[in-house]
Amino acid sequence: MAAWHRVASQEELQPDTPRAVRIGEMQLAIIRLADGVFAVNDVCSHEYALLSEGFCEDGKLECPLHQACFDIRTGKALSAPATAAIATYPVKCENGDVFVMM
Amino acid sequence: MARRIIIIGAGQAGRRCAETLRELDSTAEIMIFGAEAHLPYDRPPLSKAVLLGKGPGTGLFVRSAEFYADQRITLHLSEAVTHIAPAEKQIETAQGRIFTYDALVLATGARARRLAIPGTDDPRVMLLRSLDEALALRARLLDKPRLAVIGGGLIGLEAAASARQLGCTVDVLEAGERLMARGLPTSISRRMAALHRQHGVILHLNARLDRIESTAQELNLHLAEECRAVDLVLVGIGASPETALAEAAGLAVAEGIITDRCGRTSHDGVYAAGEVARFPNPMNIDISTRQESWLVAQDQPIAVAHAIMGQHKPYDVIPWYWTDQYDCNLQVLGEPTDRLHQIERTEGERHTLLCCDSNGRIRGAVLINNGREATPCRRLIASGKPFDITEYADMARPLRSFL
């Protein structure tokens, strides 16, 4: 059943610096942007790679292997070689902590 | 009447040209002719996911048959073009059909080079260029043969890594003194050699292969100083641009079809897209370059499509390619060479080699398991900004801070 999971404290998330977290089997990337904190599936939809190890800028996350780009807010694939979106998850911040719903 | 654009070559470059043309013009008639029976596919998975039998996901057939139908891109598969006549604006196919065009795109790619020594006509001496060749090679690798890879370049090494992962015994024979010498500095060649040795590949550098002797049981490789028995040989000694049609039609050709930055050839209304094209080098406009990479097949056809539609959008992208071997991801940007100053940035398994000119401008970079520095590297190369090169070695300073 979906539930809120604490994944980080707000202060340890630096802008444009994704943090890799695991909830059960799921690998997520948590990213702080100017307008909030976002959570996406950390695994590239093209080939296996952790997006949290890639370059992050302007609300976009770039795969470190083949440089496919994803919109952090929507999960949409913005450039080849990826064509499929990555999943996004609801995030809430409470009392300095960051929670992800999944 | 709608313009008809004919694209010869149903590979990645042909597909990209067609897609972009459709984005720019909803009415043009777009036809792609391909010799193979397959829908257009991208080649990077062939030496890795396809050989390993992993689902190549969306990386192989990027578009489905429905996509082409939906976009009104007509695919003439298994229909090789045998002749082009730019003066008449016509092409002829192997089936003897003649089509006229308003614009013609040659996206014919390259063909694998064959080894010019005795004994290579045995069916156990294979090439790896097409999907069918990759599938045939995989079928043989499943028997865990003793494999010899001729050529220590990118394709040969990727195939060697895949074969090791499938449990084959692998020898790599390289005629030169180091691996991937064409595009990499010596220090990186050494790292890749160490990686392959760690994984049990037997490397023969400076190898001189005189002939292959076939017996019913095995193939004997006659090297200058020894004879090595194997079950299977893969030849990976590079590719030559497929320029026969262009040459026969009198287009300017010099190890590739000569084009401008927008893919225009010497003949009006005829364009060249992808790795068959030789164009002004974005790193040095005064010399020409022909590049074999996913990137050039992906993005140079955008320039071609725009030129056909009368729009100026030259291809001026910094060269980039990657290779995945075992768990190692290697990316190469710009033109890293031994002639440049080399600065290393290493942090655990992550490694970046920056190659700078005497003014401290980055001209090339090699990244090992460090893809997050690719975009900053590309921008630094493109910017031509000079720096004190000692500052680059400071790992505490992320590369993006130099931008």
Image (cartoon, grey):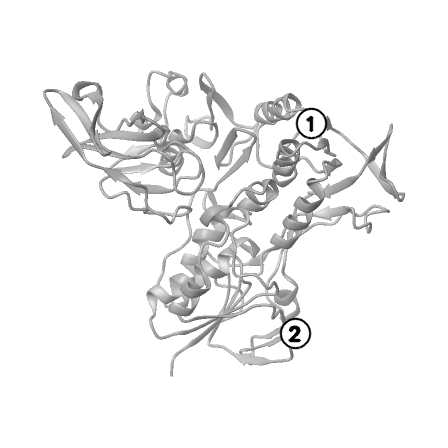
- Does the image show residue B281? no
| Chain ID of residue with mark 2 | B
In this rendering, the label closer to the viewer, 2 or 1: 1
The relative height of residue A36 versus residue B83 in the rendered view (above or below) is above
Label 2: which secondary element: loop
- Residue B29 located left or right of residue B131: left
Label 1: which secondary element: loop
- Residue B148 located left or right of residue B66: right
**Residue at position x 40%, y 62% in the image:** B19
Tell me, yes or no, whether the two marked residues, 2 and 1, touch with CB atoms within 8 Å. no
Which mark is on residue B201? Answer: 1
Label 1 crowding class (10 Å Cα cut-off): few <14, some 14-19, many 20+? Answer: many
Q: Nearer the viewer, residue B225 or A29?
A: A29
Which mark is on residue B94? Answer: 2
Which mark is on residue B27? Answer: none
**Residue at position x 66%, y 47% in the image:** B128
The residue furthest bottom is: B1
Question: What is the x, y in percent for residue B181?
Answer: 63, 33
The residue furthest front is: A1
- Residue B174 located left or right of residue A23: right
| Chain ID of residue with mark 1 | B
**Which quarter of the figure has residue B92?**
bottom right
- In the rendered picture of this protein, how many numbered marks are placed on residues? 2
Amino acid of disc 2? Ala
**Residue at position x 62%, y 69% in the image:** B80
The relative height of residue B382 versus residue B264 in the rendered view (above or below) is above
Question: What is the x, y in percent for residue A9?
Answer: 19, 19
